[in-house]
Amino acid sequence: MTRLTWLFALSCGLLTLPARAAPPEVDALLVLAIDSSSSVDRAEFALQMEGLAAAFRDAEVHAALTSGPKHSIAVALMEWSDPNWQRVGVPWRILRNAGDALKLADEIDTTPRLIDGGGTALGNALSVAVRMIQTAPIKADRKIIDISGDGAQNLGRALAPVRTAALTAGIILNGLAIVNEEPDLEDYYRNALIGGPESFVLRAANYEDFTQAIRQKLIRELSVPIAKAPQRFLNLAALGH
């Protein structure tokens, strides 16, 4: 068949192109963006990674990530510091059960530090995380960016317009403020960074507290609450019916 004949047959519906597979669907896309700037020494970076790995080995986290109607989430891990320094340590991984979460924990354990030093360019980090969400080969109703760090922005792209663009795109922004160097960082994250439905910021006093904080954070942001009973049923129950 010549190319002209093939094109004519295609236009007449006599031939069809192979259908593309539909992208997988999960309950939530989650980018974990962790601080790798100069204020984070090697021991502190190791505590962040150990804390993340421990969280994905936790049974309550396993229950949270499977609590939605699709019983699954997708996670990617990114490091950030200077305006042009953002590196994906772990690309998108779909977690459908505890086994998948344990595999991710093992992968985090062996992921090297990809950025060592630099400033705190939160605006640039958030911009890259937004792009990761928007180009993910996976569909989800909920989209979350989880930024952890120990300092306010001190260089790079302005944070406010990137935050606005993320919120306009329906992305939830949560924060984990490690306040060992900047005691007011929790307030800064609350006022300048987080946003979206049920967004929140958690506080860690130092990197030793990171493990417990990130565990609580994952449980809170991934758990799907049980729907409240309609008021008329509650009223009937109150009346003893």
Image: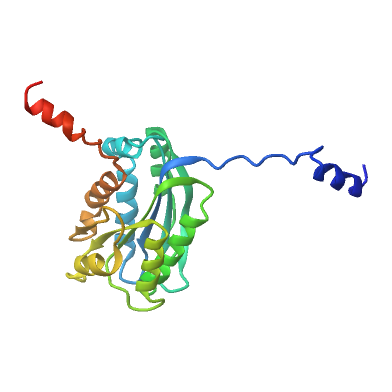
- Compared with residue 65, is residue 210 higher up or lower down, i.e. above or below? below
Q: How are the residues colored?
A: rainbow
- Compared with residue 217, is residue 130 higher up or lower down, i.e. above or below? below
92 or 236, nearer to the observer: 236
Say which quadrant the N terminus sits in: top right
| Residue at 65% in and 42% down | 20
In the image, farthest residue toward the bottom: 155
183 or 20, nearer to the observer: 20
Say which quadrant the C terminus sits in: top left
Q: Is residue 81 visible?
A: no
42 or 115, nearer to the observer: 115
Residue 171, x across and y down, in percent = 38, 57
In the image, farthest residue toward the left: 239
- Compared with residue 9, is residue 214 higher up or lower down, i.e. above or below? below
Residue 161, x across and y down, in percent = 38, 72
Residue 41, x across and y down, in percent = 32, 66
The quadrant holding residue 121 is bottom left
The quadrant holding residue 165 is bottom left
The quadrant holding residue 227 is top left
| Residue at 37% in and 79% down | 155
- Compared with residue 202, is residue 158 higher up or lower down, i.e. above or below? below
Q: Is residue 182 visible?
A: yes
| Residue at 26% in and 39% down | 225
84 or 132, nearer to the observer: 132
| Residue at 26% in and 52% down | 198
Residue 200, x across and y down, in percent = 24, 56
Count of labels in the image: 0
In the image, farthest residue toward the top: 241
Left or right, 135 with reference to 14: left
